Image (cartoon, rainbow, N blue to C red):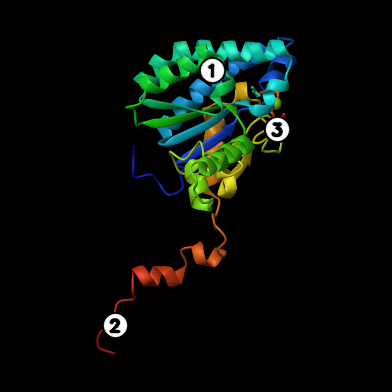
Amino acid sequence: MKTSLPATLPSHVAIVMDGNGRWAQKRLLPRLAGHRKGVEALRRCVSHCAERGVQILTVFAFSSENWSRPPEEVSGLMGLMASVLGKEAANLQRNGVRLHCVGDTSRLDADIRERLAQAERQTAANDRLVLNICFNYGGRWDIAQAAERLRLQGETITEASLGQAMALAHGPDPDLLIRTGGELRISNFLLWQAAYAELYFSDVLWPDFDAADLDAALDDYARRQRRFGKTGEQVRPGPARQEETHPPKEKNGC
Ligand code: IPE
Ligand code: IPE
Ligand code: MG
């Protein structure tokens, strides 16, 4: 994984890829056509993140709550996931992308579970970009499963132990959380990990989200001041801090 990132580039970007259904409905197409277009947008986004030097991309593909959709949409999404995994694994491999599936896989068909495991195995040695696909994922599920895991192991629940038991413990928390599709909500995504993420909302429907839209989000992030509870003065490189690093030269002779 690259180590020398510009300070203003997020190393971990998370995205709620929303708006597929509306994209299709605007064109009088079935909602699944929007989900298919959404896969193309994801492919573009993965390759642009890798080019820009983002290290981790975490995307919300199917939420714990999406089971409540009409059965034909749910089965369409399951079929799409299965076929995308079959087709894209080699592509990810070529591009140096390591895939992780994040979520409760126990409710998924054995076929999808096997394809996910296979894609994870196939890409396990890649280190250009980590792609976390959150599928049958919910932030509440993640917190509950982490707590249950600690309980079964007889471990004390602390912020640190809970964080380590979470589904995304293999990487740092997201720096930038983007939601497309115009809605201003989190919808049960990364409830724990997004504690200090910078939020960015775009009206663009996910299938239309392109490299320029991602660049706009990254540029916006670069202008943010991340304070993590401190004051602006504490984190801003001001004269005091500059003096610490470059003490004034002693004047000679007067
Ligand atoms: C997001 O797009 C993809 C999934 C939730 C699977 P939507 O399907 O929610 O699209 P809209 O919000 O209905 O337009
Ligand atoms: C969030 O989008 C889930 C995914 C993008 C996978 P939703 O479309 O399901 O969210 P709500 O229902 O509008 O909050
Ligand atoms: Mg939606």
Q: Which of marks 3 and 1 is nearer the N terminus?
A: 1
Q: Which amino acid does label 2 sit on?
A: Lys
Residue drawn at 64 percent across, 31 percent down: 180
Residue drawn at 58 percent across, 44 percent down: 192
CB-based contact (under 8 Å), mark 1 and mark 2: no
Q: Position of residue 140 (x, y in %)?
A: 64, 38
Label 2 sits on a secondary structure element that is loop
Q: Mark 3 points at which residue?
A: 182
Image quadrant in which the C terminus is located: bottom left
Q: How crowded is mark 2: few (under 14 residues within 10 Å), some or many (20 or more)?
A: few
Q: Return the residue found at the far left.
A: 253
Q: Where is residue 230 in the image (x, y as percent from the top left)?
A: 55, 63
For residue 120, what is the image quadrant? Answer: top left
25 to the left or right of 157: right
Label at residue 76: none
Image quadrant in which the N terminus is located: top left
Q: Which amino acid does label 3 sit on?
A: Gly
Q: Mark 1 points at which residue?
A: 40
Q: How crowded is mark 3: few (under 14 residues within 10 Å), some or many (20 or more)?
A: some
Q: Which of marks 3 and 2 is nearer the N terminus?
A: 3
Q: Mark 2 points at which residue?
A: 251
The answer for how far apart the CA atoms under marks 1 and 2 are is: 63 Å
Q: In this view, does 166 lie above or below 121?
A: below
Tell me the quadrant of ligand 3. Answer: top right
Q: Is mark 2 within 8 Å of ligand 2?
A: no
Q: In this view, does 189 lie above or below 101?
A: below
Q: Does the residue labelled 3 lie within 8 Å of ligand 1?
A: no
CB-based contact (under 8 Å), mark 3 and mark 2: no
Residue drawn at 58 percent across, 10 percent down: 79
Q: Position of residue 67 (x, y in %)?
A: 68, 21
Q: How many labels does the image show?
A: 3
Report the front residue among 174 and 9: 174
